[in-house]
Image (spheres, rainbow, N blue to C red):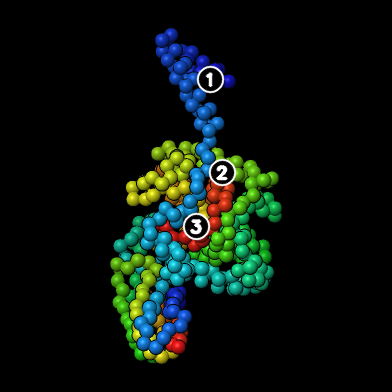
Amino acid sequence: MAKKGAQRRLSPSGEPVLRVLRLFGLGALAIASLAIAAEPQRPQPLRGGSEFQSRDVQALERDDFANPASLWLARGEALWNEARGSAAKSCAACHGDAATSMRGVASRYPKHDAALGRVVNLEERINACAADHQGAPRFAWESPELLSLTAFVARQSRGVPIQVSIDGPAHATWDAGRRTYFTRIGQLNLACTHCHDASWGKTLLAESVSQGHPNGWPAYRLEWQSLGSLERRLRACFFGVRAEMPAYGDRDMIALELYLAWRAQGLASTVPGVRR
Amino acid sequence: MLLGRVQVPRSVRKGEIVEVRVLVQHPMETGFRRDMNGQAIPLNILDKVTARYGGREVFSAELGSGMSANPYIAFYVRAEASGDIEVEWSDDHGEKGRATATLSVG
């Protein structure tokens, strides 16, 4: 198949050019196949996002009071205990004390949901619960309520290593996420791998390029002056390489989230993070 | 109601200098920003923070548009007797909030 492709490109050309083109074409094919064969390994050792932040930002993240995300956590805790919707039920009515029932849960997301028949992230799972069990309207993407509740649930898994399942029904989604991760996008024509596998630890303008692990999200980003979801952060990367930004909840984004979580497997959660 | 938190050390000795930490959730809009449609976002600043210890005012601050969103403020008081430290804040729209922390002097 490779030879056929090269010949088609060459057929209208003259003899000397043809030879050069053939060499070039075969060379390019060889490089392309090499790139597929040598898919980069996960960065070693795994280093979470906060390790690429400056010391003052790390100190802010560690300080449970001064970490601005603590305001969202307080709101999330209130929402957890608030009776909502037509069922007038709170999250706590079914799940009880979040400190025990939600321990380690966020580290297993994104996860395939049998009822919904697809892979969902934590935000979607919370919204599904709100709609199905509370009879309440879904929270909008990036709304303060959804962020607060997600951060509160994710906070219960702090210190628990990320451990997502990519077997069975989740495998196709993981594979789609992997493809997105290695596909060049945007006017800058970069894939995730070019920064986060090949260039982590290097400096990009005033930033340190991280390994791209999602273990600190949702995080308070100083640039946003607000808590934000992993999806919002991913969209910032799409913006950075001047690519079209997918909508919130886009299947490709969920797939990419699953791939990133798999890639960060074993890294302990540090939610809520603080990022520059 | 503007959400916020106050923190003091768990237990202190009489005469000790203690740090009181305050964190308030507020956008601190400068009035200079524009939204996605080009419309000016109106000024909205948390401009007054006061603290009372045992009923007596021990700290007050007037904030301006140079402060970041979700301002964090820390100040020091001398622990004299067990009592509440009540912190109140308000913004230029008249929105208010308050939080209390109890200082137990042992």
Residue at the spot of label 3: A216
Q: Residue at x 61, y 44 (%)?
A: A173
Report the Cα–Cα distance between label 1 and label 3: 45 Å
Q: Chain of mark 3?
A: A
**Sequence-first tag of 1 and 3:** 1
Residue at the spot of label 1: A5
Provide the secondary structure element on which disc 1 rests. helix
Q: Quick one: which residue is furthest to the top in this view?
A: A15
In the image, A213: left or right of A129?
Answer: left
Task: State the residue in front, A20 or B66.
Answer: A20
Query: Where in the figure is residue A146, as x and y percent of width and height?
Result: 54, 63
Residue at the spot of label 2: A177
Is circle 1 on the same chain as circle 3?
yes
Q: Residue A4, can we see it? A: yes
Name the residue type under label 1: Gly
Provide the secondary structure element on which disc 3 rests. loop
**Sequence-first tag of 1 and 2:** 1
